[in-house]
Amino acid sequence: MRVRPEIARLAEEMRSWRHHLHAHPETAYEEHETADFIAARLESWGIEVARGLAVTGIVGTLRAGSSARSVGLRADMDALHLQELNDFSHASKVVGKMHGCGHDGHMAMLLGAAACLARTRNFDGTVHFIFQPAEENEAGARRMTQEGLFQKFPMDAVFGMHNYPIVPAGQIVVRPGPMMASADFFEVKVNGRGAHGAFPHTGIDAICIASEIVLALNQIAARTVEPLEPAVISVTMFNAGESTNVLPQVATIAGTTRTFSTEVQNDLEKRMRRLCEGIAAAHGATVEFSYDRRYPPTLNHPAETEFVTAVAERVVGADNVLRDVRPVMGSEDFAWMLLEKPGSYVWIGNGPDHQGGCMLHNPGYDFNDRILPIGANYWVELAESWLAAAQRDGVR
C-alpha cells in the first residue's frame, strides 16, 4: 500500500477536520456551517470556490497547465436524523443528528486531496472538487445537475467514493455496471366511504381495499418481473383510522421499490399504478397514486471503471482491489451524475472490526480515521492519472 509523503503529512490534519465535521453535523440543505468550513480551506489553498448550487453545495476548481481536459471528484456533505450513542470526544454536539454514514470522512478525504493537488499541481488540466449536499433521501445530486453543475463546470468524467464497513480497511471495491439499486418511493391514498363500524355495508372500506393492495403489490416482483432481474417492492407505512368504531374514509400506504434496471423500474411503476387503480375500482373506491423516482440505479461506466481499477491497484495493491463483491439494494444519488457524465463509483473499506462492526446508519457508527490517507491518496492518483491519460491517449 503506497501513501504519498504529501498525503501522509496531512493525515493528522484530515483527522482534525473529520472530527470537527462529525461533532457538528448538518442535515439536507442545511449544511451552511459545513459549507463555510470547506470553502475556507479550499480558498486558503488558492482553489477557486463557487457556492450556492443546490443551496449549500460547493464546487472547488483547481487548474494547472494548459490542457482543456477536466475531471470531477465528488463527496457528500449531509448528516442523518439520528441520535448518536457514542461518547468519544468528537461525538455529535447536535441533538438528533449525526454523521452515521461517513460523509464527514468523505469530505475530509476530498479536502486532503485538494490540499495535496493545490500544493503539487502535478497535472495538466482542471480538477473540480464537488461537495454535494442532501445525499440522504433528498437527492441533492439531482438538484445539482438540474441547476447546471456540468454546464457551469464542464468535466469529461465524474467519480465518487463511499466507505463500506463490511469491507476490510485498506481495500477498495470496484464493479462495472450495477453497483447500487434505484430508490423510488410511492404513496397510495385509497378514498373509500366512511361508515359506522357496526354497519360496514353502508360504506366502502378503505382499510380492506388498502390491505388487498398491499398483498397484491407483493405479487408484482414475484410473478411479473423476469426472475433473473432483481426487484423489491416494500410497503413500509400503513395509516388509517382514528376510532375503534368508525370505518375511515381514507387509508394511505407508502413504501419503496428497488431495482438495477431502468426497464424494470419503468415496468414496476406502470404495473403498480394499474393494480392499485383496478383493485380500488373493483370495490367502488378511487386511489391517488404517486411515484417519486428519487434515485436511479448507480450504473458504473465500463471504461471509467477499468481506469479506476488500475488507479486503486496502484494505491492499495492488486490483492486489495475487490472485483467480485455483489451489488446492493441500497441506493446512492451519485447515480444522477452518472446519467449525465461517464464515471465510476467505488467503495473503500471502513473495516468490519472498527467501532464494534457498526454498519452505516447505526447510532454507534464512526468513520475509520485510518483510511483517510488511503482515500485522499486514491483521489490524487485518480486526478493526476486521468488528466495525464487524457493528454497522452485521448481517454474520455
Image: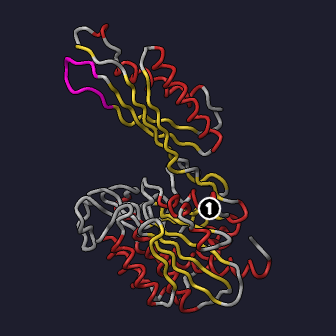
Q: Is residue 56 visible?
A: yes
Within 10 angstroms of label 1, few (less than 14), some, or many (20 or more) residues? many
- For the residue pair 249 and 160, the one nearer the viewer reads as 249
- What's the magenta bit mostly, secondary-structure-wise? loop
Per the image, the residue denoted by label 1 is 174
* Residue 396 left/right relative to 321: right
What percent of the width, then of the height, locates residue 206? Answer: 35, 21
Q: Is residue 322 visible?
A: no
What residue is rendered at 58% in x and 32% in y?
Answer: 270
Q: Residue flagged by tag 1: what amino acid is it?
A: Val
Is the N terminus in the top left, top right, bottom left or bottom right quadrant? bottom right
* Residue 178 position (above or below residue 8): above
Reply yes or no: does residue 298 show up in magenta.
no
What residue is rendered at 68% in x and 71% in y?
Answer: 156
What residue is rendered at 31% in x and 7% in y?
Answer: 201
What percent of the width, then of the height, locates residue 198? Answer: 22, 9
Q: Quadrant of residue 386?
A: bottom right
The residue stretch that appears in magenta: 239-248
